[in-house]
Image (cartoon, helix red, strand yellow):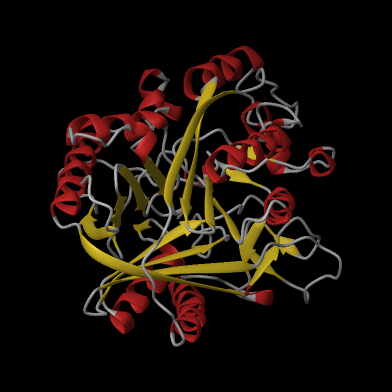
């Protein structure tokens, strides 16, 4: 892999659990309690994109799950055992579907039954399959070109921290409010062989995977699954979805009871916007591929009184023990450069105000297309702007490192951009 020709490859791995083999709880809604998944509505995938230029290898793995922790990243890299591929080379991103297994967060393995989501056998299955897929993608590397297009999807996605949003029904009951922050930018990267055959399309857009609600007990990739399937059918190859700073961003599927029909409608609406972009793609060979990864210490834990764990009556001592067991003190922040595209990993649910701030400041530095790879490489809960932290709400209660966490990670990312792009 030491030649100076850009190469890339993509592989899709089916990670849908066999419910005859695994007892699986679904993730994302406490209202489900300890109920087990009752069936599979649509498949879940892990998708692997490998890019290589000279000695540099960058890997993006997207998964149709709610969130991951860093132990999964480490396990996949170790089990794949590929020379030149380290944890610094790899970014693992969760789609944030709320209808996927709550089984892959190994840090929860020592907790009590009510909070123990980890399922060892399914975890090992997924690690094995992803490691095989990573080795397969490396073996398939071939000369490639890419193109990038971006657009704004407008009112398809909205800031949910408004009176018209109902967290139980996931529906908006009023038209979009003015002067409410929202990063509605969708960025599409598409990769082709030298014969112009599309083999991968990466879609980046911030939106919760919550069209389906707590009443759904079937495994599903939610709207992002429909979108990815449609894009792949239209363009060929593999479609991958990376979420952005979706902490306070939700799909607008109207009012009423939302279910699979609305998830499909929204997914196809996003697919349609992708197709509008890709009709005029201008492909080129990248001149720059870079990686910069840094271990970042997190602030001390700060558990707000409105934490949903405390509100559930679990007791502060219990909650503090749970947080210390399952939330890290350090995370890896990774930046990937593809020409003037800069992808910043954020290990959880960042608010849209911070994404807007990052993009604006990165552009001021001369970076053409900055974007957030949300829910990537670890899970540290919500990251709010300082103004939003001062408001009550579920998200504030799930911000477990204090009001400066999000600002600190954005500032760290901007500093790391200087290293990656050799900026002053």
- Residue 303 image-quadrant placement: top right
Where residue 5 appears, x then y in whole percent? Answer: 27, 58
**Residue under the point 37% across and 51% down:** 100
Front residue of this view, candidates 243 and 26: 243
Q: Is residue 229 left or right of residue 19?
A: right
**Residue under the point 13% across and 52% down:** 139
Is residue 272 in view?
yes
Q: In this view, does 182 lie above or below 195?
A: above
Where residue 308 appears, x then y in whole percent? Answer: 65, 34
Where residue 377 appears, x then y in whole percent? Answer: 44, 38
Where residue 355 appears, x then y in whole percent? Answer: 67, 52
Quadrant holding the C terminus = top right
**Residue under the point 17% across and 39% down:** 128
**Figure disc tally:** 0
- Residue 14 image-quadrant placement: bottom left
**Residue under the point 43% across and 46% down:** 290
């Amino acid at each position: 892999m030491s030649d100076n020709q850009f190469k890339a490859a993509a592989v899709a791995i089916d990670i849908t659990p066999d419910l005859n083999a695994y007892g699986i709880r679904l993730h994302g809604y406490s209202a489900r309690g300890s109920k087990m998944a009752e069936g599979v509505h649509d498949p879940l995938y892990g998708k692997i994109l490998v890019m290589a230029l000279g000695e540099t290898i960058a890997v993006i793995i997207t998964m149709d799950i709610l969130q991951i922790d860093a132990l999964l990243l480490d396990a996949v890299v170790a089990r794949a055992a590929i020379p030149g591929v380290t944890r610094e080379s790899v970014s693992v991103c969760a789609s944030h579907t709320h209808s996927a297994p709550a089984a892959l967060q190994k840090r929860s393995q020592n907790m009590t039954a009510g909070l123990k989501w980890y399922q060892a056998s399914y975890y090992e299955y997924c690690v094995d399959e992803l490691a095989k897929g990573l080795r397969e993608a490396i073996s398939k590397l071939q000369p490639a070109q890419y193109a990038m297009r971006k657009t704004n999807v407008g009112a398809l996605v909205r800031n949910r921290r408004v009176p018209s949003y109902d967290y139980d029904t996931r529906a908006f009951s009023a038209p979009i409010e003015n002067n409410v922050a929202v990063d509605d930018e969708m960025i599409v990267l598409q990769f082709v062989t030298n014969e112009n055959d599309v083999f991968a399309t990466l879609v980046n857009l911030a939106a919760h995977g919550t069209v389906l609600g707590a009443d759904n007990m079937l495994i599903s990739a939610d709207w992002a699954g429909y979108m990815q399937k449609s894009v792949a059918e239209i363009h060929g190859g593999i479609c991958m979805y990376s979420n952005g700073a979706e902490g306070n961003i939700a799909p607008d599927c109207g009012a009423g009871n939302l279910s699979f029909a609305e998830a499909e409608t929204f997914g196809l609406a996003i697919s349609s916007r992708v197709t509008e972009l890709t009709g005029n793609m201008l492909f080129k060979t990248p001149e720059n591929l870079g990686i910069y990864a840094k271990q970042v210490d997190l602030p001390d834990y700060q558990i707000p009184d409105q934490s949903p764990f405390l509100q559930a009556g679990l007791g502060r001592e219990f909650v503090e023990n749970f947080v210390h067991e399952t939330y890290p003190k350090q995370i890896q922040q990774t930046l990937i450069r593809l020409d003037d595209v800069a992808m910043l990993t954020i290990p959880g649910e960042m608010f849209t105000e911070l994404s807007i701030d990052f993009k604006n400041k990165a552009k001021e530095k001369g970076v053409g297309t900055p974007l957030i790879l949300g829910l990537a490489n670890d899970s540290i809960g919500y990251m709010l702007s300082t103004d939003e932290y001062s408001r009550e709400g579920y998200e504030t209660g799930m911000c477990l490192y204090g009001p400066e966490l999000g600002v600190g990670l954005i500032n760290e990312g901007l500093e790391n951009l200087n290293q990656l792009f050799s900026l002053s």
